[in-house]
Amino acid sequence: MDWQDEAIVLAARHYGEHDAVLTLLTREHGRHLGLLRGGFSRRQRPVIELGNRLQATWRARLPEQLGNYQIEGLQSVAALLLDQPLRLAALASACGTIDAALPEREPHPEIFVDLDILIARLIEEAVPGEDGRPGEDRWLVEYVRWELTLLADLGFGLDLTHCAVTGETEDLTYVSPKSGRAVTRSAGRGYHDRLLPLPAFLAEDHAARPDRAAILDGLRLTGHFLSRHVFAQTGQSSRLGASAISKQSAQAEGPMARRQFLQRLQG
Amino acid sequence: MAVNDIDRLIQILSRLPGLGPRSARRAVLFLIKKRESLLLPLIQAMQDVAGSIRPCSVCGNLDDQDPCAVCKDDRRDGASICVVTDVADLWALERTAAYRGRYHVLGGVLSALDGIGPEQLNLASLYRRVEDGEVKEVILALGATVDGQTTAHYVSDRLQGFNVTVSRLAHGVPVGGELDYLDDGTLIQALRARSRL
């Protein structure tokens, strides 16, 4: 059997000297592994860099086999970001998160489209905004929103539209680490040390452009729920040790690439 | 030699890069045929290498002396360190004879996928060498891959506090390369790094 699909490279691992076991996120076939003969050869090596867009053909005698890939590069995303450390770290983080979060061969066309859009944002030139600042912060906002959307696509969406206690829609400041629902400042006052901070740019449509601290709050928020609902299920958290899923789970954990992205963001 | 010994030798040789069981078998038969001229000198050479070659405590290069010949060479420019991924890259640069500074071998690159972090790389001794004060420039000669450049950015950030210039190799069209045959990633990098004629 065989199929042809559009794909994004999530990971490439050495198999023997020149071959690669390629993990792709495909539009119609989800996260899918396959053997690429000569994947680490001089000709194909640049094509299988992280985040690159490909046209992939997968063939196997039986559907349950690993199968073989044939690929054709569509866009070299990684090459565009090699000079930009934060965007490069974000690309690696996004690919690592998807690789850790999705089961194999389960179609998720909406997640493919979301990642495709995020990559397009990452490679956009940093255009100064109305206030003259470079556009760097805008893609960071998109990144946090992408992780929220990923959670929603996987069935663990957060409810940030109104307060879980009072039903109010204004002054939403916290998120319950258990229910994933927003809480207002007044309702959460007595529990603020046990609640996760909700950055304004996620609570309000017209909030001011966030600073790095707010972006980090957003990533810690999504990281908490990714650790709790997604990585814990797929075995990522168990690789990190018990502390990662303990009471300090408000700290964003997950794949190493995501942690490195957070470290770079923290400076 | 018993057949089992031959099998064992084939098995070991087949683990070498570029060799599979079939080519290992051919190599072993060839070695046995050329016992005096090839097999015995090979055994001697391998024993010598196993006994004498060790990593240089300064730069991580492989040599039969510590510090290695490159680190000991007074004619080399001590103000410049070229950081490479592994010894093969050092040898590649040495073949060019275009660089007369010193080297530092990291022993790999950061890789989130393989779980390789900064503590697994030979970085502490690099910082010590830079801290000593003689070094004025660090050239990051790492691969134009996501992992290679992630490592370059990491090392560059860590060297910010030192009084050194950090540079990296250019990326672009190889000598003899025709544009039509280049991947678009290389072309993008070449276009970005274009220079005035």
Image (cartoon, rainbow, N blue to C red):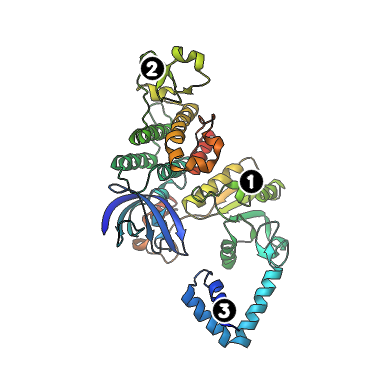
**Viewport quadrant of the N terminus of chain A:** bottom left
* Residue B40, picture quadrant: bottom right
Question: Which mark's residue is nearer the viewer, 3 or 1?
Answer: 3
Residue B87 is situated, as x and y percent measured from the top left of the image, at 60, 62
Residue on which disc 3 sits: B4
The answer to whether any part of residue B26 appears in the image is yes
Amino acid type, mark 1: Val
Q: Chain of mark 3?
A: B
| Residues indicated by labels 2 and 3 sit on the same polypeptide chain | no
Where on the picture, by quarter, is residue A242? top right
Amino acid type, mark 2: Cys
Disc 3 residue type? Asn
**Secondary structure category for the residue under label 3:** helix
Spatial distance from mark 2 to mark 3, Cα to Cα?
Answer: 75 Å
For the point 42% across and 59% down, the residue is A20
Q: Are marks 1 and 2 in contact (CB under 8 Å)?
A: no
> Do tags 1 and 2 sit on the same chain?
no
Instruction: Give the camera-side residue of A259 and A82.
Output: A259
Q: How far apart are the two marked residues, 1 and 2, measured between alpha carbons?
A: 53 Å
Residue at figure coordinates x 34%, y 59% from the top left:
A67
In this figure, which residue is indicated by the disc labeled 1? Answer: B164
Left or right side of B185 for B67: right
Number of other residues with Cα within 10 Å of mark 3, as a class: few under 14, some 14 to 19, many 20 or more: few
> What residue do we see at 39% from left, 40% from top?
A122
Q: Which residue is mark 2?
A: A163
Q: Residue at x 65, y 74 (%)?
A: B46
